[in-house]
């Protein structure tokens, strides 16, 4: 046994220590932000290991993100003074379940090398099923079906167990389509994200012997961020913990922010009922933030009803007040924040200089990131984006990954569909249909179908010859992978070269092409950190964030959702405007559920800050190329005045003598801020806005806006549309173009409103 003086126990307060030392039986730590829940959980693992209660592989420990899992491993290592070997079961629900499912795939009719589909593949598959049913997909968009099915999976409902009350979903066809989708996934030897848990719950429920094995195996179970577990995750945990009941969950009902994804805050509230005799530990001292920051956060969350209600205190002193500032528009906001970050890095106004790593911009919606990325690129401020539009979601990366997936498994029909005509091989829709038909009639994969088409000469001309070459290539890469005649990195490069994919981008004259080639290079570099291609593909399909491991200091830009559990000395919270934060959807909803979740998100945001917290809003914002005037967020009114300092922007407008000198006292409560809108400052802002050239977004200035005939476009052209911004031509049909816009999705638009962007 470890003595009382174990170093990792020394820094804990009595309540934390109680939770750490109560190793057997159920423990719940229910406490506010920054009170050291994660720290206690980490110490508990160290204690389990150091006291010899459990070996690393006997501890099942669930974190919310991969990043959190990595950090926890590091922290355990430093607590114990040695690197921990193993801990194979410390990770996210998804990463743990994928490992388990590979071992038992056959119990749910899958092979152990199943593919994990991302949301894009999932949607493509659903579209096909919906089309086959002759459903009007305008009225019943497949996306809607995807979210219905996700919701059911989160509740651990299989097609057979969806309750009767739900059967009206998707025009009464939801359940049969769900069943068809599951059948199709099995045929493809594939799963989606929701399946990882759903299948494991099914296996545990149907195979008591398998469950019993893991109940013995995982002797201790620990769960961070328990308030955000969904029903499937909850069932899975409960099944595993049923035997020994050595389960320790930590969470905060005020930080439940994934209700929209099926999380049930009720799970944490009924823990005591599920696990009788549970020890409940409450923590009240916040070690993260200074007093004003904590006061502001508490003031906001107090407006929510039905909370458990927790009082937090800090010994850290009052510190600086939360800073509030209004800007002319989103670009100005980004400019100001960029300047402010540089000033903080230098160290100003009595503040010590801060490292860029210690600063974060937390946005409500990922489209807000663009303004910051643009600005920081301009001024050369290093930044990293976590979450949001991710590296691995970019088109060229997904194409390349599809090739890699096919090298691993020729059964991967979705990957084949993606690359069969990328680069262009003269294989149009008709040729692809022939391949699909051949595959279906013969009951084989698309690659096999393609092989049969080649052998039977079913596809004529250049397309046929190219297809033959593709099939040969796929066979060769598959063989090389099996024989390990080259390293997987060399093989990856070979695939990209021999398939013509790299050449396609080298010959591409659009402004994005060089960046895409860079990304492909980055992809190959990323491969080096993995033992083989399959391990890499798995990693990518599970990845939640794309932070690089580089050593250079960087500002972090991420969504509020992704920031859960993290902390930074300085936090910027931009875009506090009604319709953006809280989101329009939550405001339109009847009832307060959505709005309360947004408010918890505000609480999460403010409580990420240790020393400096800056909230901002803009009077105008451009959304998909259109200007909108904005109202300050209702959450701003809820910030207690005593904890807030209102700043006047000294930038472009403030310094020229006019500008938006919002009177200081006007902001913290809504009545006053309404007056603020009538203030001379605000009126000046309005008139500036009226004078602003709205019709031409700034990116368009460099473009040649001469009327271009539709016929001058070809598929793949990079274009700009006045309303929807940048995009790529997918199809040309008469005077209409089908364009995949970067921000606005796929739309059919009239050609004369489109101009070419770049060569
Ligand atoms: P959140 O709800 O945001 O996830 P949390 O409750 O998990 O917060 P931690 O991240 O564990 O809180 O801790 C917040 C900060 O307080 C960390 O920097 C941690 O190292 C520090 N801390 C926690 N407990 C103590 C303690 N007893 N003494 C000193 N510092 C502590
Ligand atoms: Mg935590």
Image: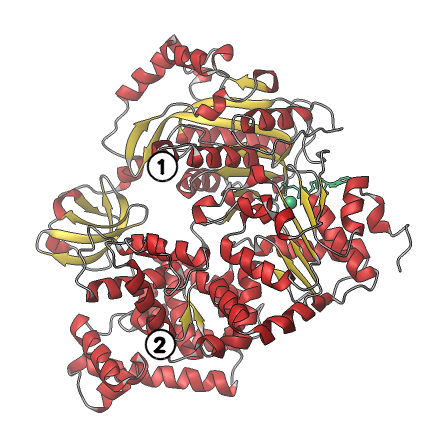
Which residue is drawn at the image coordinates 29% and 58% (left, top)?
Answer: 174
User: In the image, residue 589 lies at what x, y percent?
Assistant: 35, 35
Please indicate, yes or no, whether residue 759 appears anywhere in the rendered image.
Answer: no
Which residue is drawn at the image coordinates 82% and 57% (left, top)?
Answer: 81
Check the picture and name the quadrant holding the N terminus.
bottom right
* Left or right, residue 335 beside residue 565: left
**Snapshot colouring:** secondary structure
Graded by Cα atoms within 10 Å as few (under 14), some (14 to 19) or many (20 or more), the crowding at tag 1 reads few
Please indicate, yes or no, whether residue 42 appears anywhere in the rendered image.
Answer: yes
* Left or right, residue 140 beside residue 732: right
* Left or right, residue 127 beside residue 649: left
Q: Which element type, helix, strand or loop, lies under badge 1?
A: helix
Residue 585 circle label: 1
User: In the image, residue 510 lies at what x, y percent?
Assistant: 29, 55
Residue 392 sits in which quadrant?
bottom left
> Residue 680 versus residue 232: which sits nearer the camera?
232
Return the residue at label 2: 187
> Residue 304 versus residue 208: which sits nearer the camera?
208
User: In the image, residue 70 lies at what x, y percent?
Assistant: 64, 57
Instruction: Give how far apart the Cα atoms at labels 2 and 1 are.
Output: 37 Å
> Residue 161 versus residue 57: which sits nearer the camera?
161
Q: Spot the residue most to the left.
A: 734
Q: Return the disc, 2 or 1, that comes first in the chain's sequence.
A: 2
Which residue is drawn at the image coordinates 39% and 14% (left, top)?
Answer: 674
The correct choice, above or below, for 471 with respect to 580 in the image is below
The correct choice, above or below, for 408 with respect to 30 in the image is below
């Amino acid at each position: 046994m470890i003595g009382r003086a174990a170093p990792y126990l020394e820094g804990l307060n009595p309540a934390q220590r109680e939770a750490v030392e109560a190793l057997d039986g159920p423990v719940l730590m229910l406490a506010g932000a920054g009170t050291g829940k994660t720290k206690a959980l980490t110490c508990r693992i160290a204690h389990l290991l150091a006291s010899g209660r459990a070996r690393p592989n006997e501890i099942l420990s669930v974190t919310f993100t991969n990043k959190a899992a990595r950090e926890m491993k590091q922290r355990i290592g430093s607590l114990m003074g040695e690197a921990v070997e193993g801990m194979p079961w410390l990770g996210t629900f998804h990463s743990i379940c994928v490992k388990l499912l590979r071992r038992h795939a056959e119990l749910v009719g899958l092979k152990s090398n199943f593919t994990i589909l991302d949301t894009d593949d999932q949607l493509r598959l659903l579209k096909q099923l919906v089309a086959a049913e002759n459903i009007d997909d305008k009225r019943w968009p497949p996306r809607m079906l995807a979210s219905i099915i996700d919701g059911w999976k989160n509740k651990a409902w299989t097609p057979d167990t969806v309750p009767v009350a739900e059967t009206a979903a998707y025009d009464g066809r939801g359940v049969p389509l769900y069943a068809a989708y599951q059948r199709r996934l099995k045929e493809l030897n594939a799963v989606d994200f929701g399946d990882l848990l759903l299948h494991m719950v099914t296996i545990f429920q149907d195979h008591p012997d398998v469950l019993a094995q893991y109940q013995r195996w995982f002797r201790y179970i620990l769960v961070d961020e328990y308030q955000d577990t969904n029903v499937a995750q909850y069932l899975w945990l409960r099944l595993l913990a049923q035997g020994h009941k050595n389960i320790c969950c930590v969470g905060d009902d005020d930080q439940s922010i994934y209700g929209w994804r099926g999380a049930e805050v009720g799970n944490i509230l009924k823990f005591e009922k599920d696990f009788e005799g549970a020890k409940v530990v409450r923590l009240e001292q916040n070690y993260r933030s200074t007093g004003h920051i904590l006061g502001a956060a508490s003031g906001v969350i107090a407006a929510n009803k039905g909370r458990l209600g927790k009082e937090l205190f800090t010994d850290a002193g009052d510190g600086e007040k939360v800073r509030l500032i209004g800007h002319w528009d989103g670009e100005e906001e980004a400019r100001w924040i960029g300047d402010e970050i540089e000033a903080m890095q230098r160290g100003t106004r009595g503040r010590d200089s801060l490292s860029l790593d210690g600063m974060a911009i937390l946005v409500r919606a990922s489209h807000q990131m663009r303004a910051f990325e643009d600005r920081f690129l301009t001024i050369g401020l290093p930044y990293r984006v976590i979450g949001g539009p991710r590296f691995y979601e970019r088109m060229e990366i997904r194409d390349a990954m599809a090739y890699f997936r096919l090298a691993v498994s020729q059964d991967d029909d979705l990957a084949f569909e993606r690359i069969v005509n990328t680069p262009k091989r003269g294989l149009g829709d008709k040729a692809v249909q022939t391949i699909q038909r051949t595959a279906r009639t013969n009951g084989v994969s698309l690659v096999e179908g393609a092989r049969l088409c080649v052998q039977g000469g079913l596809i004529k001309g250049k397309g046929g010859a190219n297809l033959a070459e593709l099939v040969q290539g796929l066979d060769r890469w598959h063989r090389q992978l099996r024989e390990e005649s080259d390293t997987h990195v060399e093989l990856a490069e070979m695939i990209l070269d021999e398939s013509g994919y790299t050449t396609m981008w080298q010959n591409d004259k659009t402004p994005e092409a060089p960046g895409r080639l860079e990304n492909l290079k980055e992809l190959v570099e990323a491969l080096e950190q993995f033992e083989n291609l399959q391990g890499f593909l798995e990693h990518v399909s599970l990845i939640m964030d794309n932070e690089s491991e580089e050593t250079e200091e960087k500002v972090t830009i991420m969504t509020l959702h992704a920031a859960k559990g993290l902390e930074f000395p300085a936090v910027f919270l931009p875009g506090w405007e009604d319709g953006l934060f809280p989101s329009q959807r939550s405001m339109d909803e009847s009832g307060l559920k959505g709005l309360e979740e947004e408010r918890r998100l505000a609480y999460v945001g403010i409580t990420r800050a240790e020393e400096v917290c800056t909230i901002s809003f803009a009077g105008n914002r451009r959304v998909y190329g259109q200007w909108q005037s904005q109202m300050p967020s209702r959450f701003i009114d809820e910030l207690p005045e005593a904890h807030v300092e209102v700043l006047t922007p000294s930038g472009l407008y403030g310094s020229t003598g006019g500008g938006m000198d919002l009177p200081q006292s006007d902001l913290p409560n809504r009545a006053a801020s309404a007056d603020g809108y009538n203030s001379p400052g605000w009126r000046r802002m309005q008139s500036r806005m009226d004078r602003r050239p709205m019709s031409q977004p700034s990116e368009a200035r460099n473009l040649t806006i001469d009327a271009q005939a539709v016929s001058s476009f070809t598929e793949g052209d990079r274009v700009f549309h006045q309303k929807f911004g940048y995009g790529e031509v997918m199809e040309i049909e008469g005077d209409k173009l089908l364009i995949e816009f970067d921000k606005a999705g796929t739309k059919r638009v009239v050609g004369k409103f489109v101009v070419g962007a770049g060569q």
